[in-house]
Amino acid sequence: MSEVNLDPLRLAYKKAVDEWVDAIRAEEALATPDHSMIAMEHWDAAYFKEHDSHTKATEARDAYKDALRAVNYGI
């Protein structure tokens, strides 16, 4: 794998992290003084979206790191 092929992996990782950060902010915005059951359900739904986004960011990070190891160390 060449360094040129690393760019799409790096960009995919950056995009996944940006989406994760957006999901964190969306979840945080739902932590409001509204103590209703509906508000709690929206907050929970945002948590699950954040969790999924974190998983995608971790997978993208691992793919990028594996490619870096292959280029830099031949592993």
Image (cartoon, rainbow, N blue to C red):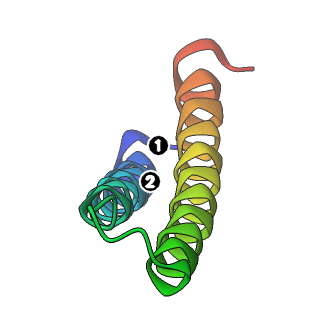
Residue carrying label 2 = 5
Q: Secondary structure at mark 1?
A: loop
Where residue 59 appears, as percent x and y from the top left, is 65, 49
What's the residue at 60%, 43% (across, down)? 58
Q: Secondary structure at mark 2?
A: helix
Residue carrying label 1 = 2
What's the residue at 42%, 51% (across, down)? 13
**The residue under label 2 is which amino acid type?**
Asn
**Mark 2 crowdedness (10 Å alpha carbons): few <14, some 14-19, many ≥20:** few
Left of 46 or right of it: where is 70? right
Residue nearest the viewer, comparing 18 with 38: 38
Q: CA distance from mark 1 to mark 2?
A: 5 Å
Q: Give above or below for 24 relative to 75.
A: below
Where residue 45 appears, as percent x and y from the top left, is 57, 76
Left of 39 or right of it: where is 54? right
Residue nearest the viewer, comparing 53 with 35: 35
Where residue 42 appears, as percent x and y from the top left, is 49, 80
